[in-house]
Amino acid sequence: MGIIISLLLFSFLIFFHELGHFLAARFFGVHVEVFSIGFGKRILTKQIGDTQWSFSAIPLGGYVRMKGQDDSDPSKKSYDSDSYNSKTPFQRIVISLAGPFANFLLAFLLYLTMSSIGIPKLLTTLSDVNQTHPAYAAGMRTGDSITSINGVRTVYWEDVVNNIHQEPKALNVTVLRDNEYIDLNIMPIEYKTKNRFGEIKTRYIIGISADQKVTQTINYPLRDCLCLW
């Protein structure tokens, strides 16, 4: 199922990329003969207007074939008014760049949509404290909320991770428990893992897990989205 979903998402990205080329070509009056998602044998084709819209057997790319643009058969080159070769260098550059531009536009629109709807972020409430690790020995318990580490305020779980995993240094951690602030001194321990390439990576842990149910939705106004972009 994961592979199918990945292919569908990849096909959507390809479609948007090729759509950029297609729209730019049509804007300058170029006849687009084929719009295909995938390569190889066509398994589904529908003629819409003057263009064949196709899904091909190998879903690892896509293409638009414009009139006068056939590298496999130089004899098919055309210099008619509706062919790619008849356009000015500037127009051909725009057609070529329209695909990457469409991808940038899609990324911006998705980012803008997510920011407007809201992005849930984990807070610092703990769902589990491992009894064999330093956090428990120092007095940290399930349900605590970490409010600061070494004097630096922690609001989201990523703040906690960034302050713990980087280096083996003693931590002064303040937690909120039953409306009371408690200061704890914790020394992280070294933890080694292998990444997907088999490389050994070292990080430092204290034996805590975030409560996945305790989140806060962050909304960004349009002005902030444009600045972040």
Image (spheres, rainbow, N blue to C red):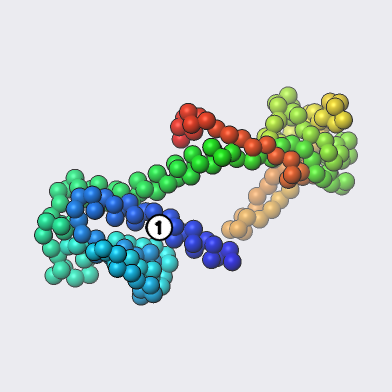
The number of numbered discs placed on residues in the rendered structure image is: 1
Q: Residue furthest front?
A: 49
In the rendered image, the residue lying farthest to the left is 80
Residue 125: x %, y % from top left? 77, 38
Find residue 12 and report its image quarter. Answer: bottom left
Looking at the picture, tell me which residue is in the foreground, 20 or 152: 20
Q: What residue is at 39 percent from the left and 54 percent from the top?
A: 16
Residue 167 visible in the picture: no
Residue at image position (68%, 36%) is 216
Compared to 112, does 20 lie above or below?
A: below
User: Residue at position x 13%, y 70% from top?
Assistant: 75
Residue 117 visible at all: yes
Q: Position of residue 189 (x, y in %)?
A: 78, 43
- Given residues 84 and 152, the one toward you in this image is 84
Task: From the top left corner, tell me how far across and down residue 175 is, in percent.
Answer: 81, 30
- In the rendered image, residue 191, in percent from the top left (x then y), is placed at 74, 48
Disc 1 residue type (three-letter): Ile
The residue that mark 1 highlights is: 14
Q: Is residue 223 left or right of residue 1?
A: left
> Is residue 183 depicted above or below 124 in this figure?
above
- Seen from the viewer's position, the closer of residues 216 and 210 is 216
> Which corner quadrant holds the N terminus?
bottom right
